[in-house]
Amino acid sequence: MRNVIAVSLAILLALPAAAQAQRTSRASTEVTASEPGQRVDKLFAELKRATSERAAERISQRIWQEWLRSGSASVDLLMQWSQKAIDDKKYDVAMDLLDQVVTLSPTYAEGWNRRATLHFAMDNYSKSMADIARTLELEPRHFGALGGMATMLKNAGRSDAAIRAYERVLEVYPMMRSAQTELGKLADETAGEGI
């Protein structure tokens, strides 16, 4: 688990700032938003500018909708079936379906993220961290994956790493209340350790 956390943390910290800057600059220019990547870039630019928690939540839901579109009817159907299996607590069935998703579409970030979430629900933390790392390689702004990583790092007692992960969440989704709250708690805890 420690090695996977260390590798995942290294990936988190090494996510190219240049790629982030390029996405931000592309999003800030006028785009027709006809291409899925352009729509997501535009939504992330709006998310950074959101001035209320409710507005940010609406924008984040639109981002999730974009992320769920794989571009493949087969993968979309497998994702729907996996969600039904998860809802029915048939985790083994859901895992088989998600394994098919990442095999059929290895560049589909949400397939990896969904599988990471399922691994977490099944207490397979090292596998969850590995899938989060892959998600973040494909979509460094994936605030769901970043939040999941932060939670696992916090639970593993890696407060400094968790703080950095929550800071990354807030870089892309500044109005996320849960990340703000957790970051505040961790900052208070680590400040108290130095006394």
Image: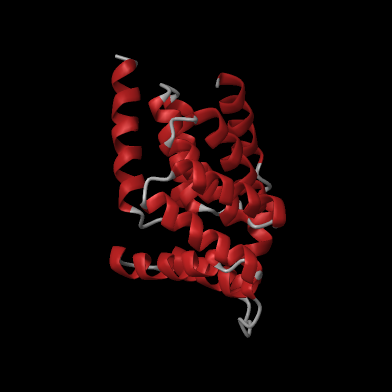
Q: Quadrant of the N terminus?
A: top right
Residue sitting at x 66%, y 47% = 137
Q: Quadrant of the C terminus?
A: top left
**Rendered image quadrant of residue 11:** top right
Tell whether 19 sits left or right of 47.
right
Q: In this view, does 139 lie above or below 195?
A: below
Q: Which of 184 and 119 is in front in this view?
A: 119
Tell whether 187 sits left or right of 32.
left
Residue sitting at x 53%, y 53% = 142
Q: Which residue lies furthest to the bottom in this view?
A: 32
**Residue 63, x across and y down, in percent:** 49, 67
Q: Is residue 59 above or below residue 165?
A: below
Q: Residue furthest top?
A: 195
Residue sitting at x 30%, y 38% = 184
Q: Which of 188 and 138 is in front in this view?
A: 138
Q: Which of 133 and 42 is in front in this view?
A: 133
Q: Is residue 167 visible?
A: no
**Residue 126, x across and y down, in percent:** 55, 28
